[in-house]
Every structure is written in structure tokens, then in C-alpha cells.
Image (spheres, rainbow, N blue to C red):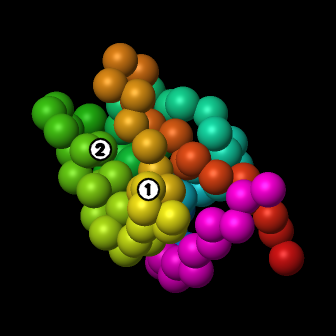
């Protein structure tokens, strides 16, 4: 049983990169998403893909906002594959 919880408020505009990431993570908890896939989501409606570490910056911001639960971040990194929301999601 996992007791980690988080309450996060994000602008619901689908063009908001943080909203796009949160949506991807909660829709597919524990599934690793590649940086390339997440980059495509964060760029919807924003023009061309920005090269580099843009997704890493967005993930870092989300980690800060979510904080740590039980000593571990809620968003985990698989260095070879990408990022995952490392908890179960329960809709209430």
C-alpha cells in the first residue's frame, strides 16, 4: 500500500507545459515516458520543438512543486529511458 499523496494546482490550459506533463504522468502512472515523447506534449500549440533539456527543466519544476514523499521524489528518472510518475493515482 502506497500512502504518498500530493495536491498540486496547475493551470488547466492544455498548452501549459506543466499541465501537459502532469496529465501524461497521472494518466499513465508508473509508466516510463521518454524525454522525446514528453517534449512533444509540452510543445503542443507552442510552435517548433525546442532542443536541449527543456523537458528536464519542466520536470525539475514539477518535482519542486510536488516535494518529496517518504524521502523520494514522486517523479522518478530512468536514465536510459525517461521519466515516470512513481506512485499510484486515485481519483476522488
The quadrant of the image that shows the C terminus is bottom right
The residue stretch that appears in magenta: 1-11
Residue farthest to the top?
80
Query: Residue 7 appears in which quarter of the rendering?
Result: bottom right
Q: Residue at x 26, y 36 (%)?
A: 49
Q: Secondary structure at mark 1?
A: strand
Query: Residue 23 appears in which quarter of the rendering?
Result: bottom right
Residue 57: horizontal and vertical position, in percent? 22, 52
Q: Residue at x 50, y 56 (%)?
A: 74
Q: Main secondary structure of the magenta part?
A: loop
Residue that carries the numbered disc 2 in the rendered image: 55
Frontmost residue, 14 versus 20: 20
Crowdedness of circle 2 by 10 Å Cα count: few (<14), some, many (20+)?
many
Discs 2/1, front: 1
Asked whether residue 44 appears in the rendered view, the answer is: no
Frontmost residue, 30 versus 9: 30
Asked whether residue 82 appears in the rendered view, the answer is: yes
Residue that carries the numbered disc 1 in the rendered image: 72
Residue 10: horizontal and vertical position, in percent? 49, 76
Crowdedness of circle 1 by 10 Å Cα count: few (<14), some, many (20+)?
few
Disc 2 to disc 1: CB gap under 8 Å:
no
Amino acid at each position: 500500500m502506497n500512502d504518498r499523496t500530493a495536491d498540486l494546482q496547475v493551470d488547466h490550459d492544455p498548452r501549459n507545459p506543466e499541465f501537459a506533463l502532469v496529465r501524461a504522468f497521472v494518466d499513465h502512472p508508473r509508466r516510463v515516458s521518454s524525454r522525446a515523447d514528453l517534449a512533444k506534449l509540452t510543445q503542443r500549440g507552442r510552435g517548433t520543438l525546442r532542443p536541449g533539456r527543456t523537458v528536464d527543466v519542466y520536470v525539475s519544476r514539477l518535482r519542486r512543486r510536488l516535494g518529496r514523499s517518504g524521502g523520494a521524489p514522486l517523479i522518478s528518472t530512468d536514465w536510459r529511458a525517461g521519466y515516470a510518475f512513481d506512485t499510484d493515482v486515485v481519483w476522488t
